[in-house]
Image: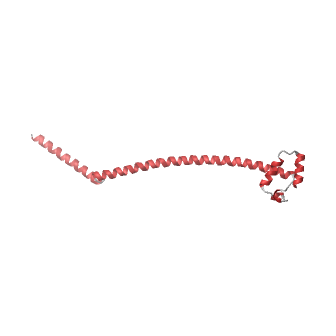
């Protein structure tokens, strides 16, 4: 059997080569495993350690995937809240813009607020004057 990568030192083998050995030895019994290891210049303990590393790596991937999934859900909820807040603020901004436009239109029609107040006071004064004149006219007759 050929040595993976042409490298005699098994600690320098790639992870892919080590994984292939784990796969090749997965169904071997103890005697077959010992023979396989002798032919490759390996120790049974090395192959067992590589098998354990493969098993842990798969478990780590599952844990990492679960963690990433949870993080994704949290980010999606955060995005949903931010979008809701943005919609609320956009509505408030639109309402404020509408009020400003209406205020400008009102000022264009009736003048600014101070002038409008002055006109209103003038109208009230004129109304009182007319009312007083009416009372005097009615009382004279």
Question: Camera-side residue: 140 or 27?
Answer: 27
Question: Camera-side residue: 38 or 52?
Answer: 38
- Indicate the quadrant containing the N terminus: top left, top right, bottom left or bottom right: bottom right
Give residue 29's position: percent from left, percent from top. 87, 44
Give residue 55's position: percent from left, percent from top. 77, 48
Q: Residue at (12%, 42%) from the top-left corner? A: 137
Question: Camera-side residue: 88 or 46?
Answer: 46
Task: Specify the farthest residue to the left.
Answer: 141
- Indicate the quadrant containing the C terminus: top left, top right, bottom left or bottom right: top left
Q: Is residue 60 left or right of residue 8?
A: left
Q: Residue at (56%, 48%) from the top-left corner? A: 78
Task: Specify the farthest residue to the front.
Answer: 1
Q: Residue at (45%, 49%) from the top-left corner? A: 90
Give residue 108's position: percent from left, percent from top. 30, 53
Q: Is residue 35 left or right of residue 84?
A: right
Give residue 134's position: percent from left, percent from top. 15, 43
* Colour convention: secondary structure
Q: Residue at (25%, 52%) from the top-left corner? A: 118
Count of picture labels: 0
């Amino acid at each position: 059997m050929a040595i993976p990568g042409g490298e005699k030192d098994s600690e320098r083998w790639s992870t892919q080569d080590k994984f292939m050995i784990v796969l090749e030895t997965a169904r071997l019994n103890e005697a077959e495993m010992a023979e396989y290891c002798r032919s490759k210049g390996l120790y049974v303990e090395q192959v067992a350690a590589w098998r354990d590393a493969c098993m842990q790596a798969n478990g780590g991937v599952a844990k990492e995937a679960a963690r990433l999934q949870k993080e994704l859900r949290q980010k999606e909820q955060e995005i949903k809240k931010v979008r809701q807040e943005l919609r609320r603020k956009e509505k408030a901004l639109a309402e404020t813009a509408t009020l400003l436009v209406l205020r400008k239109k009102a000022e264009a029609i009736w003048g600014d607020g101070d002038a409008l107040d002055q006109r209103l006071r003038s109208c009230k004064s004129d109304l009182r004057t007319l009312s007083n004149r009416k009372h005097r006219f009615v009382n004279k007759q």
